Image (cartoon, coloured by chain):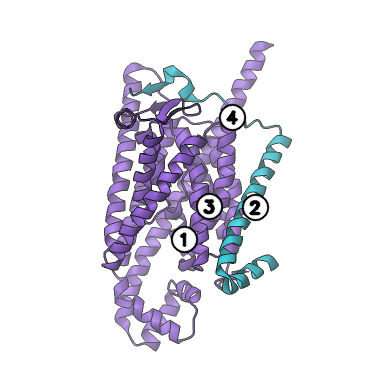
Amino acid sequence: MIHMPVSGVEMAWWPLLLIGFTVGVVGGFFGIGGAWLVTPTLNIFGFPMIYAVGTDMTHLVGKSIIATFRHWKFGHVSVIIALVMLIGTFSGIEAGAQILRYLTKIGQAGTVVRYLYMILLLTIGTFMLSEYLRVRRQEKKTGKEVADVVGTAWSRWIQDTLNIWPTFYCPVARMKVSLWAILFVGVVTGFCAGILGVGGGIIRVPALIYLMGVPTKIAVGTDLFEVMFSGAYGCFTYSLKGGVEVLGAAIMLLGAAVGAQFGTICTKYVYGITIRLVFAVATFLCCASVILKQIASQYEPVYKKGIEALLKQEGFSAGEISALIYKKDAMYHYMVEVANRPEWYVAFMKNYLWTMVGGYLMLAAASGICIYIVVQLFAGIAREKREKELAARAKA
Amino acid sequence: MGYFEWLAALEKASPLSYAGMTVLTMVCLGGALGILADLIFKALRIDLGKYKKEYEEEDKVIKVQ
């Protein structure tokens, strides 16, 4: 057990290391932060929830530096696209955040945001999956292997419509593009991320592929470059609000440092179209996580404010309350024995069960995707070794 | 551990310094781990430099014009 100095909570260190590793593999492979995987999983292991998002965002800064460095060495990072897009992303996030504040003010934020997020994720996942299946059908018909699809009718339209000075050639992505087209895509994705209150990797990667028309691997590397900056911004603001458990983030980063190498190196051995398939599966899982969160949140209004006030009265800190609120025995004691409110406990148990279902589903999803990526990596390394040996033999 | 205890104390005393130090800690740790991994790959003679990507082979890619 390890003492978390900011929240004052005691917890085991190995789940943090393991979660860091798993999300490191997934993040390095897809170019996403993976908060939707980390937050419910941390919950299972008793990590105080008010620190979960901030701590994930904090470890993301270090992880994205490691993954971006490796992708950059592979030649997957278009620095110019990332930098210009970053300007658009930040302005879009700010505009989206203003709307989110308004929705929060009228008490509609939670539900509206979750439904919007579900629709967006389902659309992205369905589109990517149908494209993958179309490519596979085409392969069967023509007998010719397809490794990636570059450009779409949308990306063509954006680039033709916004073909305004200054335009430049991007050698990494092998495309000529206008600064305004990149800014436009940055603002659109930033706006979505801002209104949904998420990091945005799961939106930005498909946007880079379908709206900008960049190859899949460049989209992954370029997004990770952006994540370095957006993660640092998120880390700073969450730290300022006291929502970061820095020791937890450091332990997660140690695991992620190894995982990110696995995930990133694997992109060398798989085709872009395969990355899109796994990405589509990930978006469906992310959507499932949001649906379960929506179901669980329906029971919160019955007990949350009341129990929080009671625990505050009992002298618990915000961090301790956040950790206690997921412990059945403690909740039974305070809700039934102390407050004599059995209806609170019934609603709490419903919320607890749905939250646990979500947590275990995300844990299984993260582990499954992680195992798939690691298997692909080792298969790729073995294939490369075989090919090198055959080439050496042929030369001899 | 002493460093993290100090950071936790800083969080209460000066949130702005704590926020700055948190970002700096992660940047330094991430940078150091990235460089360390690179040195390990070099020591193991594993080449992880640029390689020929699938989109560089015209016949393997569908280009939508």
Earlier sequence position, callout 3 versus callout 4: 3
Can you identify the residue that label 2 sits on?
A: B28
Q: Position of residue A189 (x, y in %)?
A: 36, 45
Counting other residues with Cα less than 10 Å from the Cα at mark 4, is it few (<14), some (14-19), or many (20 or more)?
A: few
Chain of the residue that carries numbered disc 2 in the rendered image: B
Residue A259, above or below B41? below
Which residue is label 4 attached to?
A382
Spatial CA distance of label 2 from label 4 is: 34 Å
Which amino acid, mark 3? Leu
| Image quarter of the C terminus of chain A | top right
Residue A131, quarter of the rendered image: top left
Count the numbered circles shown: 4
Q: For chain A, give the colour.
A: purple
Q: Dot 4: what SS? A: helix
Alpha carbons under labels 1 and 4: distance apart:
38 Å
Task: Give the labeled residue for mark 1.
Answer: A53
Q: Quadrant of residue A245?
A: bottom right
Pinpoint residue A261: horizontal percent, then vertical percent: 59, 42
Which one is closest to the eye, mark 1 or mark 4?
Answer: 1
Which subunit holds the residue at mark 4?
A
Q: Do callouts 2 and 3 point to residues on the same chain?
A: no
Residue type, mark 4 in image: Ala
Inspect this view and state whether residue A239 appears: yes
Q: Residues within 10 Å of mark 3 (few under 14, many from 20)?
A: many
